[in-house]
């Protein structure tokens, strides 16, 4: 029987095969510097060679395939994504963005097409940070921003990243040696499943990413007075949890209706935590993100202002600690336009949207202009074995990516 699709049948079989390379027999888990990483990278390297690429493992452990261009010295177009996973992962997050550009190069190779620039396809290590808690180290190494302090991070068994590098057969002192000189990479383009429901909601297969949102996370502590749940009248309480609940609802109100802005209270604890005690203390997290930092920071300022007002009215003390801050990374306007043109050339509509999640592309922005194409995933589910994609979307994403690659011109 003839294949239904030019690309998708083989790619979905490849993604299934990668999805079976797991540290656990019941679910997909493939972490940094493990035998499973090695097996997955060897498999990917074989597919890269079949596609006409020269393949190497770089000093950080990334697998890199190179399809030479007609001009020897032109800066390369780099494509790729990550090959590691979260625990109990789906099989498309990351892997799609490695398999699709390999399929594109295989097609160029079959047709004997050489582009003015070389194409490199990278399967990054350790985007997720599942094992050591320090994500994006593969792309950081290539972008020249790898911090050797990360080598001290330890996994649950107490093994440091540095020790794991040695055990894997790589020299931790040489991780940064794979950093690319500025100007040698013309652009980085990453295809990734959306991991959210926006494309599906808009009935679109593909979207063009505008920016990778910057996040700020705070820990908020509100202190009132614990008391007897039966004896203290309602008007005389200093209930810390009720103030926290008000703040959570204020975050929902403030972040609703502004494009790209999202706010989440993902953790909340009432202390001392007994059924018959008025909460004397509440501790909760605030995660606010947006496609640009000004939008995000304005929302945070408003929320913190509301927090102070609520606590003042309720006669409570509060403190706020910032735990994490990353700046938004814009995609390059010319790359966005090229991606949009390549998608529309497939005869389909598209939209622009921000990425609320972090990606290797954000790290690569320290080295070169970046772009991202999002592909619809079923019900927006990701980081979950229920992650699913449509074969026709895989086909569209790959033909659009191939069009992008063939039409690519360096940007400034
Ligand atoms: Zn991913």
Image (spheres, rainbow, N blue to C red):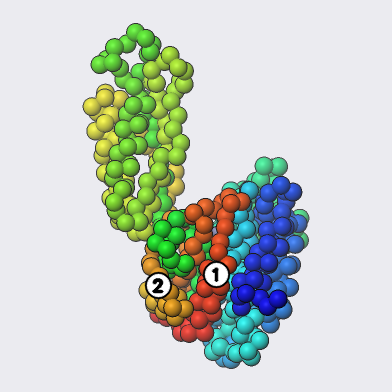
Question: Looking at the picture, does residue 303 appear above or below residue 12?
Answer: above
Where does label 1 land, which residue? Answer: 392
Residue 320 or 387: which is nearer the viewer?
387
Would you call the spot at circle 2 few (<14 residues within 10 Å), some (14-19), or many (20 or more)? some
Residue 126 or 228: which is nearer the viewer?
228
**Judging from the image, what secondary structure is the residue with disc 1 in?**
helix
Q: Which of marks 1 and 2 is nearer the N terminus?
A: 2
Q: Is residue 62 visible?
A: no
Question: Looking at the picture, does residue 196 appear above or below residue 181?
Answer: above
For the residues labelled 1 and 2, say whether their Cβ atoms are less than 8 Å apart.
no
The structure residue drawn at horizontal position 39% and vertical position 35%, both measured from the top left corner, is: 220
Q: Position of residue 172 (x, y in %)?
A: 68, 59
Where does label 2 land, which residue? Answer: 349
Q: Quadrant of residue 210?
A: bottom left
Q: Where is residue 402 in the image (x, y as percent from the top left)?
A: 54, 79
Q: Where is residue 109 in the image (x, y as percent from the top left)?
A: 65, 85
Q: Quadrant of residue 111?
A: bottom right
Residue 245 or 375: which is nearer the viewer?
375
Q: Position of residue 283 (x, y in %)?
A: 42, 31
The structure residue drawn at horizontal position 35% and vertical position 56%, both measured from the top left corner, is: 260
Of all residues, the one furthest to the top in this rendering is 231
Would you call the spot at circle 1 few (<14 residues within 10 Å), some (14-19), or many (20 or more)? some
């Amino acid at each position: 029987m003839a294949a239904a699709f030019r690309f998708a049948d083989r790619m979905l079989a490849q993604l299934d095969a990668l999805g079976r390379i797991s540290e656990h027999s019941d679910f997909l888990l493939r972490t940094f510097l493990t035998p499973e990483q090695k097996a997955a990278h060897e498999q990917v390297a074989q597919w890269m060679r079949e596609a006409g690429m020269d393949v190497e493992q770089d000093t950080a452990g990334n697998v890199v395939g190179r399809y030479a261009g007609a001009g020897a010295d032109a800066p390369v177009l780099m494509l790729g994504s990550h090959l590691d996973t979260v625990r109990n992962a789906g099989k498309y997050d990351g892997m799609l963005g490695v398999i699709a550009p390999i399929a594109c190069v295989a097609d160029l190779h079959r047709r004997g097409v050489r582009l003015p620039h070389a194409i490199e396809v990278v399967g990054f290590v350790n985007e997720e940070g599942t094992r050591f808690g320090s994500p994006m180290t593969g792309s950081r190494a290539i972008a020249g921003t790898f911090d050797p302090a990360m080598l001290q991070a330890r996994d649950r068994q107490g093994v440091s990243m540095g020790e794991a590098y040695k055990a894997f057969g790589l020299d931790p002192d040489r991780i940064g040696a794979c950093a690319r000189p500025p100007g040698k990479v013309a652009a980085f383009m990453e295809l990734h499943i959306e991991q959210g429901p926006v494309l599906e909601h808009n009935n679109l297969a593909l979207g063009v990413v505008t920016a990778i949102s910057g996040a700020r996370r705070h820990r908020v502590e509100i202190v009132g007075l614990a008391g007897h749940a039966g004896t203290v009248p309602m008007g005389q309480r200093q209930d810390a949890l009720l103030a926290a609940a008000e703040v959570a609802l204020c975050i929902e109100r403030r972040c609703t209706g502004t494009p790209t802005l999202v706010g989440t209270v993902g953790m909340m604890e009432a202390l001392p935590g007994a059924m018959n005690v008025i909460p004397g203390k509440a501790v909760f997290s605030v995660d606010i993100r947006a496609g640009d930092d000004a939008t995000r920071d304005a929302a945070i300022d408003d929320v913190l202002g509301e927090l102070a007002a609520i606590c003042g009215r309720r006669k409570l003390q509060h403190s706020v600690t910032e735990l994490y801050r990353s700046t938004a990374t814009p995609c390059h306007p010319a790359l966005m336009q090229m991606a949009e043109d390549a998608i529309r050339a497939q005869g389909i509509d598209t939209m622009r949207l921000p990425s609320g999640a972090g990606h290797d592309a954000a790290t690569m922005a320290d080295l070169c202009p970046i772009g991202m194409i999002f592909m619809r995933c079923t019900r927006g589910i990701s980081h979950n074995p229920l992650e699913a994609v449509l074969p026709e979307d895989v086909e569209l994403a790959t033909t659009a990516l191939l069009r992008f690659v063939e039409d690519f011109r360096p940007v400034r």
